[in-house]
Image (tube, grey):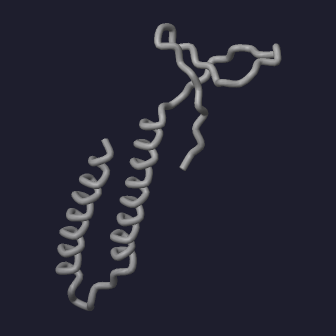
Amino acid sequence: MADYLEAWQCIGCGRIEAPQPCIGVCRDRKVLLVGKDEHERTLAEVAALRKALDEARARLGRFARARPHEGQWERSWLALQAELRHTLAWLEQATASTD
């Protein structure tokens, strides 16, 4: 898991300061911070999307290796279309859950 900087944020103006002694060379700079909950939620979404992508690769890899039997091209094509529709529906559902 990621390391987090513990800092103090003013409930009035929003200023954030880390608890450490100043040596007189500080300069304020604009920084963007992400809360721990949001960061962890994003990490979970990324993990779910990677898992969905791996599953999609595995499903689609079956089609790359498929070889219809002689005289079965049409039947194989129809079966391939049905399986691809199923895979596309599954992929849409898998990625919609991260929205």
Relative to residue 5, is residue 97 depicted above or below?
A: below
Image spot of residue 39 (x, y percent): 47, 39
Residue closest to the eye, 13 or 74 = 13
Q: Quadrant of residue 32?
A: top right
Query: Toward which corner of the image does residue 85 lie, by quadrant?
Result: bottom left
Q: At 36% across and 64% down in the image, what residue appears?
A: 56
Q: Is residue 69 above or below residue 79?
A: below
- Name the image quarter holding the C terminus: top left
Image location (x, y in percent) of residue 42:
43, 42
Between 31 and 19, the one nearer to me in the picture: 19
The residue at the far bottom in this view is 70
Residue drawn 56% across and 21% down?
Answer: 8
Classify residue 72 as left or right of residue 64: left
| Above or below for 75 versus 51 | below
The number of numbered discs placed on residues in the rendered structure image is 0
Q: Residue at x 35, y 76 (%)?
A: 62
